Every structure is written in structure tokens, then in C-alpha cells.
Image: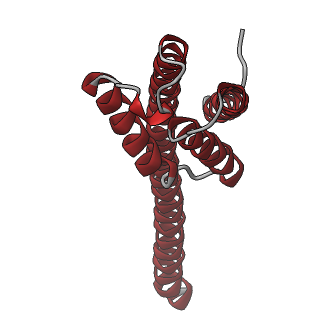
Amino acid sequence: MTWFNGVLPVITAGVGFMASYLGDWGRDRRAERNENARRSAARVDEHDKFEIGVLTSCSEHLSTTTNAALKIYVEQVRFRVDNPDADHGDAKISDDLQGEYARGRRELERLTGLILSASVRASVEAATEAIREVRSFRGNSRSAFEAYRSAEGLAKDAQAALATRIRALYGGDRP
């Protein structure tokens, strides 16, 4: 019996130590998994915030650039109507309007490279290119009008693509 009384406490202590060790190990693993999940969620949140910021800014600059291109187009049409014999390149566009267009286009081109969705990026690039063509158009008024209408349609498509992507990042359309 002495042997039993001497070994039982050692076995009990060993089992207790193993149980404590395994409990701590399991608790540490759970804590590590929870921390990794928290970090992953934070990374996704930061990614989404960045992308939403880029898409929102891109949408604003696309509107600015499209509106400036429209104003420039209207100024060119007015000039052609008022001066039918003048060269189309003689139209005087205000520095403010040219600056608004140039700033919008530069920002739009800078932001387009940051758009993560390939389809949205392609849509914005197509709109930007069409707007650039309208701005530099030197031809008869019918061709300029057709170019502007095309650019306007592509800009609307790009705005729709941007809005769809933003809604998707926010978790879809909610009432």
C-alpha cells in the first residue's frame, strides 16, 4: 500500500500538469486564431475603405471632367455659330474652364490606375479616352456632337460601374 500511496500523488500531479498544459495550449491557439481573424477583418476593412475612397473620388472627377468637356463643347459650338467663317481652333475657352478640365482629367487618370476592379477600370478608361477626344476634336459640328454623345454615354456607363462597385463594397443594395 505504501507504494500505491507514493505513486498515486505523482500520477495525479502528472495528469494535472498535462491537463493544465493542454488547456493552456488550446486557449493560446484559440486566442491566436481570434487575433488572426481580427487582423484579417481589419485588413479587409482598410482595403474596402481605400477602394471606396478611390471609387468615390474617381466618380467626382469623372463628373467634373465630363461637365467641363460639355462646357467646352458648348463654347466651341457657340463660337462656330457666331463665327461661321473662322477656323474652329480659334474658339477662345476661358482659362478657368480649361483648368477645371485639365485638373479633372489629371486626377481621373491618376485615380484610374488605383481602381482594383478590372471591368470598372476599363469602363472609366474608355470614358476618359472618349472625353479626351471630344476636348481635342477639330471637325464639323455634327461629328463633334456625335463624339460628345458617345463620350457622354461612356461616362454614364462608367458612373454606373463605379456606383455598382461601391454598393457591392458596402454589402449590396439595402432599403
Residue 143: x and y in percent read: 71, 32
Classify the position of the C terminus by image quarter.
top right
Locate the N terminus and report the quarter of the image it occupies. Answer: bottom right
Q: Position of residue 88 (x, y in %)?
A: 50, 32
User: Which residue is depicted at the point 66% across and 33% down?
Assistant: 151
Q: Residue at the spot x=61%, y=31% of the render?
A: 166
- Residue 38 is situated, as x and y percent measured from the top left of the image, at 47, 49
Q: Residue at x 57, y 37 (%)?
A: 131
| Residue toward you, 105 or 171 | 105
Q: Is residue 88 above or below residue 32?
A: above
- Please count the marks in the image: 0
Q: Is residue 130 above or below residue 10?
A: above
Extreme residue toward the front, this view: 85
* Front residue (pair 73, 56): 73
- The residue lying at 47 percent from left, 62 percent from top is 32
Q: Is residue 28 above or below residue 174?
A: below
Toward the top, the furthest residue is 175
What colour scheme has been applied to the protein in the rendered image?
secondary structure
Nearest the eye: 66 or 31: 66
